[in-house]
Image (cartoon, rainbow, N blue to C red):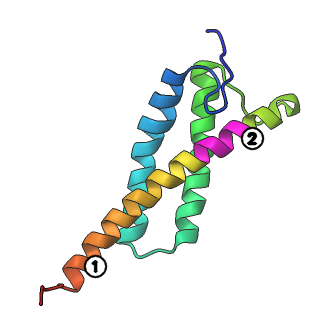
Amino acid sequence: MQKEMALLWEVTFFEFLIVTVVIGGALAYAIGRSTARSWSGWGLMVFYCLLLAVAIRFLHFSLFHGTFFLPAATLPTALHYAVIDFAVILAVASLGRGRTRAGQMARQYRFEKA
């Protein structure tokens, strides 16, 4: 498979879409929902998203011959794409957390029209 090395994806856009956005996004949404339902803080959600970003980077490496954090020669490239994966994952997790927390607040504090 020929590498494209674009700014947002390492191998192909389709690979980025499937692994990071679809698989990582679904897991990130679940992370956001679970931290909201357990009334955990933002720090725990960020930590879980960081772990998920490393796992997603490993999927890119193992399935599509992307870069990983070892050997040291590939570290800058791997960090670049890991930060992008983390940003996408954190955005989707924040969306899941916000939607879940809004539902919790609406059920807890019934707002009525005046």
Q: For residue 112, what is the image quadrant?
A: bottom left
Q: Residue at x 61, y 9 (%)?
A: 1
In front of the other: 12 or 112: 112
Residue 63 drawn above or below residue 98: above
Q: Is residue 59 left or right of residue 80?
A: left
* Label located before the other in sequence (2 or 1): 2
Q: Residue furthest front?
A: 114
Determine if the magenta segment contains residue 28.
Answer: no
Q: Secondary structure at mark 1?
A: helix
**In which quadrant of the rendered view does residue 103 lie?**
bottom left
Q: Which residue appears at 84% of the width and 30% of the height? A: 71
Disc 1: CA contacts within 10 A as few (<14), some (14-19) or many (>=20): few
The x, y position of residue 23, in whole percent, is 43, 37
- The C terminus is located in which quarter? bottom left
Q: Which residue is mark 1?
A: 105
Residue 77 lies, in percent from the top left, at: 77, 33
Q: Main secondary structure of the magenta part?
A: helix
Q: Position of residue 100 (x, y in %)?
A: 32, 66
Q: Which residues fall within the magenta stretch?
A: 79-86
Q: Is residue 64 left or right of residue 38?
A: right
The three-letter code of the residue at mark 2 reads Leu
Identity, as a three-letter code, of the amino acid under mark 1: Met
Left or right of 19 in this view: 47: right
Instruction: Name the residue beneath numbered marker 2.
Output: 79
Q: Give the residue furthest to the top.
A: 1
